[in-house]
Image: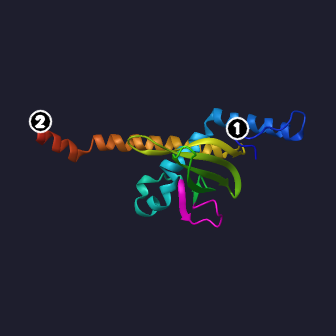
């Protein structure tokens, strides 16, 4: 496969035509933000759904009717998460590896693959980035992308999660026990 730093095919060849089409489709995917959408949803929410659905259904949107985790039969995937979203089956495979760069710095990269009904629709190359407070997985390349209705399903899921979070924050801010405690603590009648 043509990597980020690899040699490009010669103009006029079939390989060059395909290479150019791949670049065009990668740009289209980035323009609509599908790489960020899926990585953000997976790393902040979806990877936890199998546990959350068993222990606290409150954290899983009703549109997710099922979520399970299993090990992978593939060498390059450590974790497999299957969800049913809007009555469609989606499978996420994730695997990572750490290695040292020539300058001695350690880095961690991973591959996140999304399947819709067992058909690969997206594969992202991600890196684990650190700052002073936390670490975060971010996509840096798109290795596979098949356009489809699945994008709308995950866009809607993101909106649902945002609305649910805002509702929980409002409920928390207006919690009668909290209001009572604040009234007591500050002598408010």
| Total marks in image | 2
Instruction: Single out the residue that lies furthest toward the front.
Output: 103
**Residue at point 46%, 60% (across, down):** 53
Mark 2, secondary structure of its residue: loop
- Residue 87 in view in this figure: yes
Residue 55 x, y percent position in the rendering: 41, 62
Q: Mark 1 points at which residue?
A: 26
- The residue shown at (61%, 65%) is 72
Q: Which-is-in-front pick, marks 2 and 1?
A: 1
Residue labelled with disc 2: 188
Residue 155 location (% of width, % of height)? 58, 41
Q: In which quarter of the image is residue 182?
A: top left
Closest to the observer: 72 or 161? Answer: 72
Name the image quarter holding the C terminus: top left
**Any mark on residue 182, and which?**
none
Q: Counting other residues with Cα less than 10 Å from the Cα at mark 2, is it few (<14), some (14-19), or many (20 or more)? A: few
Residue drawn where x is 80% and y is 35% of the image? 20
Res. 157 visible in picture: no
Secondary structure beneath label 1: helix
Tell me: residue 150, above or below residue 51: above
Magenta-colored span? 64-79
């Amino acid at each position: 496969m043509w990597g980020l730093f690899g040699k490009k095919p010669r103009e006029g060849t079939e390989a060059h035509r395909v290479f150019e089409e791949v670049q065009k489709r990668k740009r289209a995917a980035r323009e609509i933000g599908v790489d960020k959408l899926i990585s953000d949803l997976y790393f902040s929410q979806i990877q936890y759904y199998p546990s959350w659905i068993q222990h606290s259904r409150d954290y899983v949107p009703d549109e997710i009717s099922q979520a399970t985790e299993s090990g992978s039969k593939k060498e390059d995937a450590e974790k497999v998460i299957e969800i049913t979203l809007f009555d469609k089956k989606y499978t996420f495979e994730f695997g990572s590896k750490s290695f040292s760069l020539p300058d001695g710095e350690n880095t961690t990269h991973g591959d996140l693959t999304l399947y819709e009904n067992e058909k690969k629709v997206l594969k992202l190359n991600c890196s684990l980035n650190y700052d002073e407070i936390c670490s975060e997985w971010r996509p840096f390349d798109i290795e596979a992308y098949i356009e489809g209705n699945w994008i709308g399903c995950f866009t809607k899921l993101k909106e649902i999660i945002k609305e649910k979070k805002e509702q929980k924050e409002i409920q928390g801010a207006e919690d009668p026990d909290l209001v009572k405690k604040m009234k007591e603590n500050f002598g408010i009648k």
